[in-house]
Image (cartoon, rainbow, N blue to C red):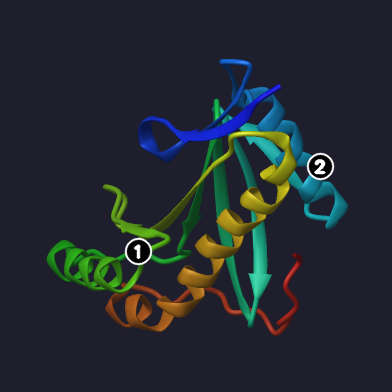
Amino acid sequence: MERRRRSGRGGRARVFLAGRAMTMKRREIEELLARLLEERGIPWVREQGLIRFRLRRKGAEWELNCRCQDGLVECYARYPFSISNRAEALRRCNEINLQTARGTALLPPDGRPVIRAVAGIGDIYDAAERVERALDDASRLLLRFWGSLQQAGDNQPTVTSRANARR
């Protein structure tokens, strides 16, 4: 049986077995993500089509929201502070976007910056690695630009003394 990889719309990888596409389904990706979080002891909830949880690292705590779709997982890391000066916030998000290749800085209407990382998940063989990479990319970028965005922020986030990452 011939097996080839092709990239489809939006960078979603698909595996073709005997001419038939085999993309992981949304439900399978959600189950994989839930299992990865449970293995690490990270409590999570499912709300409004998202898997939501909190992480702590280097004294900072933030929320991650993951949206699973067929062949894709999107990870949104939300900063715990807002920036009311929209022009300054957009300028800083643009600076971040110019420096990154594996994530995007966004500014929703509530003024709390978000880092988004996306992973295409074509098959089960490397799915866990791709989900973990998306989570790591979102978290790493959030921490990398924390200081820059915090300086422009309206209020300071609660910084905990626990520097342990839960992942």
Residue at 48% in and 64% down: 80
Circles 2 and 1 in contact, beta carbons < 8 Å: no
Compared with residue 147, is residue 111 higher up or lower down, i.e. above or below?
Answer: above
Q: Quadrant of the C terminus?
A: bottom right
Residue at 53% in and 71% down: 140
Which residue, as the protein is rendered here, is positioned at the far left? 87
Image label count? 2
Residue at 71% in and 27% down: 28
Q: Position of residue 53 (x, y in %)?
A: 66, 50
Q: Position of residue 36 (x, y in %)?
A: 78, 48
Q: Position of residue 92 (x, y in %)?
A: 23, 72
> Could you tell me the amino acid type at mark 1?
Ser
Label 1: few (<14), some (14–19) or many (≥20) C-alpha neighbours in 10 Å: many
Q: Which residue is mark 2?
A: 35
- The quadrant where residue 124 appears: top right
Residue at 72% in and 72% down: 165
Q: CA distance from mark 2 to mark 1?
A: 32 Å
Residue nearest the viewer, comparing 101 with 55? 101
Q: Position of residue 102 (x, y in %)?
A: 42, 61
> Could you tell me the amino acid type at mark 2?
Arg
Q: Which residue is mark 1?
A: 82
The circle on residue 36 is none
Q: Nearer the viewer, mark 2 or mark 1?
A: 2
Dot 2 lies on which element? helix
* 36 relative position to 143: left or right: right
Residue nearest the viewer, comparing 108 with 125? 125
Q: Quadrant of the N terminus?
A: top right
